[in-house]
Image (spheres, helix red, strand yellow):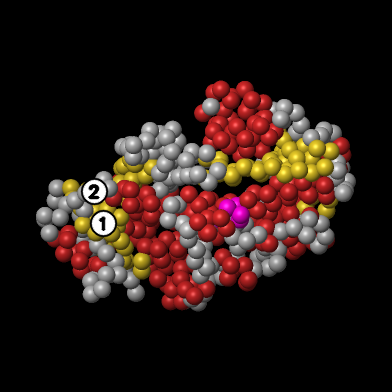
Amino acid sequence: MRYSKTEILAGLQCEKQLFLRVHHPELAVQQSTPDSVTGQVVQAHARLQFPDAVLVRRGAPGMDPFAKSAELIADTSVNTIFEAGIQSQELAVFVDVLQRNGQAWDLIEIKATTDVKDKHIEDVSVQAVAVAQAGIPIRRFWLMHINNEFVYHGNHDYTGLLIREDISARVLSHMPFIESKLVPLQAVVTGQQPERHLGSQYNKPYPCPYRPYCETQAPDYPVADLPNGWQIIQTLHAKEIFDIRDIPAGMLTSDTHQRVRRITIAGVPELLPGAGEIFTTLPYPRYYLDFVCIQFAIPIWEGTRPYMQLPFQWSCHIERDPDTLLHREFLDTSGVDPRRAFAEALLAMCGESGPIIVYNQSFEKRIIRELAEVFPELCVALLALNERVFDLLPVVKANYYHPAMKDSWSIKCVLPCLVPELSYKDLAGVQDGTEAQAAYLAIINTNTPVSDKQQLINNLLAYCKLNTYAMVKVSARLAGK
């Protein structure tokens, strides 16, 4: 059997994933993520740098991409090939760019990241083994990726956005490892389904499409749910301990892990009585604030960089006093740079006094600092907001845990446990940050029908409003109300 690069990488990540890909592809949960869409956009942009390239169109009627690629490689008048199909006895891969270099070729892999990562070396090394087995001489291996120091100055000038980095030495040194894994991975496919338990392999280096299936086979409270517990999780698995409730007393040294174990075994949530005391010191008015941002791999607004967090929406619930709750919101759907309007509306709403309550302050405070740098005339007022920020996350983390939270103190996990009458699952269309970004991109897309845009706007407003109302209700429950 000949294996694709995707299958080999899956097997290197988790042997069970490879087995399921080959024998039970119907169990996979496939979804288009922002990363995959971004990759396609960057791929298209990178191809502009090779105007003489010939594209091998996979799936074209009556065309064998491997035979066509071999024909193009043999044709000395062809200088560059996109999506060249290379197959050997063991492997079948498609190469982003093959560029002729004298009597040999350069292999160029395009990635939407801002640096070279270990997973990229593994990716290109699989391709390197395939082309070596196929007898195609390669002079250099390159990774073309985004330059994170690039600043867009307008006029569709993206000179310098993408850079090439020579990864030949790393690829050549990693090829023997890949070659040593081919036979064992083939044995995985022809054998019985491997037994693997929930762990970091479900997210690293890539999200596993079979995780939902594996979760149905896992204990109710797998030890993989221990927060930041990679080392102890490996130890527990080695001792064949897979459920948090089965961990012997005294085996965990982390206070957080001991707490998770104790509460999980008890089966009831724990809310410490001291949590309410914290809120007696917070004056009014209280501003419960949340931001929503967008990131572009290829910047579209002047003065912005790749993957810069660009705020376009905020929601704020304002407690004037214990009996008065107001709501204010901002959402810019014009498609132009929203940051100035965002900052001015934020300053007008927040006033000059009262705690600004957020959930995980590093995000909101960083956005405010960056706005202050961009708009120096607003700098003093914006930085003054950061002096008022109160972070709700450490308060929740120190005082509350529910077994159903499964190692996460995110507001989306805490809310249905502490405030069961509220849930993000009740929202239509936008239930998390990823869906919020997708909705925003659709709204500013001129091809989106007006009626669809209005529904997307309503979904975004409802999502961000729940983010801040959730903080209001969580704070109230912590305070015993």
Up-down relation of residue 333 to residue 78 (above or below): above
Image quadrant where residue 162 sits: top left
Identified by mark 1, the residue type is: Phe
In the rendered image, residue 215, in percent from the top left (x then y), is placed at: 62, 67
Answer left or right for 119 relative to 365: left
Please name the residue that numbered disc 2 is placed on.
50
* Residue shown at the point (56%, 35%) measured from the top left: 341
Whether residue 114 appears in magenta in the rendering, the answer is no
Answer left or right for 206 relative to 477: left
Q: Which residues are magenta?
A: 456-460
* Residue shown at the point (68%, 68%) measured from the top left: 219
Up-down relation of residue 219 to residue 338 (above or below): below
Please name the residue that numbered disc 1 is placed on.
82
Identified by mark 2, the residue type is: Phe
Up-down relation of residue 349 to residue 414 (above or below): above
Image quadrant where residue 226 sits: bottom right
In the rendered image, residue 135, in percent from the top left (x then y), is placed at: 20, 60
For marks 2 and 1, give the CA distance: 9 Å
Marks 2 and 1 in Cβ contact (< 8 Å): yes
Q: Which mark is residue 236?
A: none
Q: Earlier in the sequence, mark 2 or mark 1?
A: 2
In the rendered image, residue 169, in percent from the top left (x then y), is placed at: 32, 45
Nearer to me, 314 or 265: 314
